Image (cartoon, rainbow, N blue to C red):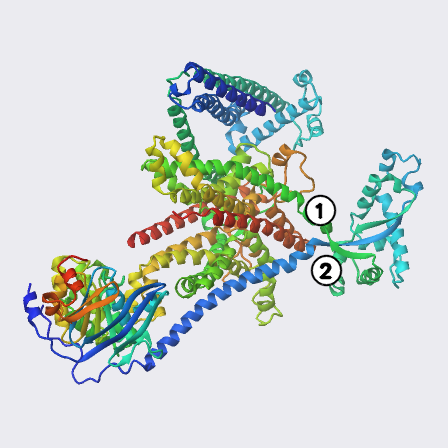
Amino acid sequence: MPASWILLSVLALTLIGYFLARQRAVASAGGDRRLLHSLPNYYGLNAALAAAVPALALLCAWMIIQPLAINSYISNDLPAEVRAVPGELSLAMADISRVADGLSEAVARGAITTEELDKLDAEASDVRSLLAGVGVALGSDVDAQSLDLARSYRAATNTGNILRNVVVLLVALAGMAIAVMITNKDFRARNFVERAILFLLVAAASVAILTTIGIVFSLIFNTVDFFSRYPADDFFFGTRWEPSFSGRGGASDLGFLPLIWGTLFISLIALIVAVPLGLMSAIYLSEYASKPVRAVAKPLLEVLAGIPTIVYGLFALLTVGPLLLDIFGRDGALGVNWMSGGTAAMTAGLVMGMMLIPFVSSLSDDIINAVPQAMRDGSYGLGATQSETLKQVILPAALPGIVGAILLAASRAIGETMIVVLGAGAAASLSMNPFDAMTTVTAKIVSQLTGDGEFNSPETLVAFALGMTLFVITLALNIFALWIVRRYREQYE
Amino acid sequence: MTDTNTSMAPAGEPKRFGSLLEQSDRTKRRNAKEKRFRLYGVAAIAVGLIFLTALVVTIILNGIPAFTQTHMTLQIELPADKLDKKGERNLADIKKVSTFGYNPLIDAALVRAVTEAGVETDITKGKDLRDMLSSGAGAQLRNAVLENPDLIGTTHAFTLLTSSRVDGYMKGRVTRVSLARDKNLTPEHLNIVDGLVDTGAIRRSFSWNFITGTDASESRPEQAGMGVAMLGSFFMMLVVLVLSLPIGVAASIYLEEFAPQNTFTDFIEVNISNLAAVPSIVFGILGLAVFIQFAHLPQSAPIVGGLTLTLMTLPTIVISTRASLKSVPPSIRDAALGVGASKMQSVLHHVLPLAMPGILTGTIIGLAQALGETAPLLLIGMVGYIATNYPDGIASGFLDPNSAMPAQIYEWAKRADPAFYERAWGGIIILLVFLVTMNAIAVMLRRRFERRW
Amino acid sequence: MKDNIISEMDVTTDKIKISARDVQVYYGDNHAIKDVSVEIQDKTVTAFIGPSGCGKSTFLRCINRMNDTIDICRVEGDILIDGEDIYDSNVDPVQLRAKVGMVFQKPNPFPKSIYDNVAYGPRIHGLARNKSELDDIVERALKRAAIWNEVKDRLHAPGTGLSGGQQQRLCIARAIATEPEVLLMDEPCSALDPIATAQVEELIDELRQDYSVVIVTHSMQQAARVSQKTAFFHLGNLVEYGETDKIFTSPEDPRTESYITGRIG
């Protein structure tokens, strides 16, 4: 593993730098540590950081850039008609890199020597079975051109790796050497080290930005790719969701409306369950409950929030669904025959509502407590009962905050995945009946991305367009809700 | 002041207030309303608690049976002429006999056991009787023999797994009625099972296999276990811990202690609060696109799961870490700065250690959340992979395809055989045991180190 | 302003409205009010003065049982209004508070319109049979609180948009809209500027015609300006109670004198 060796070498240089610089600093002060500008450790740390940080940063950057560079270099040699279609190009490149990896693997295992590899002829020998022998399965036979490209791909990668190792080691060595050279007793090592640490802290904080960028880019690129294969109009305004499973048939209906309908329907059921229950629980716990009751009931309710969603999903699928079917299904307790299967919008909605109770309750609790005591006093002073005070003074005063909390809960419900994957069913429908099976945006993201479809088919790529709409909807809800809640809080601060 | 002459009570009207000692009708009505409102509150909490109870009871009732397994003890004759024709007890020779070679031995033993139990039955063929045993029974026997070749030529008692239908019958899940339409077992078999239970040949007992074992294929629910998925989760959590704790703490220190008030800082803060509310499935898409599609990390590998969950957990850890940094009073920082420490020293030497219990509590809670998260794992391929092998070594633990606890539960929930549902519930019990333990540790940490300034 | 006129007014009636006997108040273990007995007359402004933390507000809040809303607070002794013990188990604090209105230290209008603020009390107590009666009650209360002219054109604007002095007068209007017989005021001017204070003080004097007003104040000047009777509290004890003029000119207790002359406080 060359990458891990280079890592170890850099670490070794780091350690060496640490001790050398430390020693040099103490020596330059004639062994009297009081003469040093900084504590001896700082001199060591300075050299260690100088050796490790630039080298490791370079290593990371290199590992990201090299495949990209090689890809564009190799793809220039592909036929023009392949290069013209983005999907074809990335498919071809994926094949080539796979063959190249397979060849490297074969060489590493001794199935073929480097010389044999150079002379390898695609027509004469069966590259596919050779690679299968080392555990790399290929979808099709390798033609002469692909083999050539794979060979040059492999060569370029090898050269790049060697170059990378040399450069990274040199950078580490140079960093260490410079840091050790400039070490003397008056060198302000602590300031340098602290600046470096601050830089690392900023880098850590930037991970949040990088994550957001990563999300946006991974969604945008694939979404654009999707819309180049499937018309946006048909996606956003299509009323049928019927992906064909044959792969690139082009016969798929990928309409967004049934999915968002199911999502909103189920979320609405969940909110109808969670909002009254959560709100009343919050009111009771914060205004009425005695201390011991509050101390027991509040954490117990919050347990509901800590249970993983897979548990709720299973509960919906195996317990709530059959139970509802026994009541509302054919031959059910009510004899109404509204429900034909255990998985339905109602099943998922009810269970999701359960999950959201503590979420609504703890948010509302905070918000109700933020209403100043003076409001309560004013109302009690006029002879209002507690419930009158709550209903006519506190809740209206807290309304913006509660609306914000409900919007946050709605965003949770819209983004929830496991409960709907297991509990809501798989059929996309625009039904008005809450006991019908429905499906949601999140459930379809899962099913389209975990299926066997080819990655570059619209049936798979549609998941990214769905993800993009989901991201935009929840983001907008969250920003709006947080804005409302913040404005509400400022009003009473 | 112009309106002094407006008197409040119009003259001649009777005095409005009666005696305070009697409640007026209106007050009674209002108090009744008050009582009703209070009752709604109690009802809401009761409904919430009933939900919780129903959930817990369902999990326990359905999940506990997964921890026990039904076995059949059979006296099996291991004739040397069939298993080791050369008689040299050479392991290579013994290995030549495949599972199919062992099945007739089991069949014979079954026929004998049924006769001894004195059960009257139409099923006389051993091959049909073998439906009562797991389809892995032959392999189980073969492995036992390969481990101890001296057994060949003797008759030895083996405890073999029964099929999931027999197991289900012992657990009350399978009935004669439900078997009427079943291809795998007939109600007639159950009469034999009853007889064998009487003789003590069939027994249901606690089984470690469910906790430590590997997943099994769709046709053998009785063999499936959580062990490998637990390892997968463990390696993932290791990645999450190693990455999210230092990055989260560093980011929080910067934002809380060093960041200037500017747009860049604001932008980071907005990003973090929004990331905390992004649906987890979107992180799955991120993981798929960045780590697998772009960086070509192996699919289904715990390292990819770990990286994805790290990004998801970071906002949680940053938010709780900032809260605990904020709770350290400024006087501590001033005291350190006052004796000539640099800002960095005051933070690293004084503020951070004081905030550590809070940070750890937040981290454990974040980890617990990540441990139970399923949706992102679906997208990076940790579902659909059947975890039948333990990882060999640490690198393999991170890089080789594996499952994770919640993904394994999902996998089982999707399979057609109801015997897997029991496994899924049992898996949830294991998962919840971990979560409860982690949360308990977090609560203990908080109690133990909670400081009031 | 016309404080000299106010102080020269005679006390008009001698009827006892509120009578407290041996009242003790505890906050947990803290004995906040010790053995307070006092008789408060009808149609009179009675001022409670004393250094902060002396228990004057606590005692005021006993008169309409506002202390009930504080869990750890315990009240012993008797407080009678019109001869009825308000701590009797049959008494509903809700009914009591309709009869004994209260105005608080900080103006606390509800985040509703001016109209709804004033109409709140009449609505919950069911004082109006229809909309036009309610309109009348609101108008009368606002006029009585001397704020009608300032708000009559924007009755449906939020009450929180008014100035501090207007807000406090709105709160007074809100309190008198339920037509109470006693009006308790807990430092009603402490959050107001001098001009608003003068307006509210003037209003208090006018309210005396219909109500028994009890006002807590930390300002001796205010007590002297608006009240006919003054009670001086110190460390939970009622030290001295009598005609305002007398308390301020010839106090009997040395502690009262020290406070009035500014030596304690």
Q: Earlier in the sequence, mark 1 or mark 2?
A: 2
Element assignment for label 2: loop
Task: Say whether marks 1 and 2 touch (CB < 8 Å).
Answer: no
Callout 1 crowding tier (Cα within 10 Å): few <14, some 14–19, many ≥20:
few
Q: Residues within 10 Å of mark 2 (few under 14, many from 20)?
A: some
Task: State the image coordinates of residue A189 (x, y, percent, origin top left).
Answer: 40, 22
Marks 1 and 2: which is nearer the front?
A: 2
* Residue under label 2: B171
The answer to whether residue A205 of the structure is visible from this angle is no
Q: Chain of mark 1?
A: B
Residue B389 placement, left or right of A388 = right
Q: Is residue C197 above or below residue A412?
A: below
Q: How many marks?
A: 2
Residue type pointed to by label 1: Ser
Quadrant of the rendered structure where residue A405 is?
bottom left
Foreground residue, C156 or A217?
C156
Residue C163 sits in which quadrant?
A: bottom left
Q: Quadrant of the N terminus of chain B?
A: bottom left
* In this picture, residue B352 sits left or right of residue A487: right
Q: Secondary structure at mark 1?
A: loop
Look at mark 1 in the image and give the residue it sits on: B217
Q: For residue B244, say whether it is visible.
A: yes
| Percent of width and height locating residue A221 | 47, 37
Q: Nearer the viewer, residue B205 or B348?
A: B348
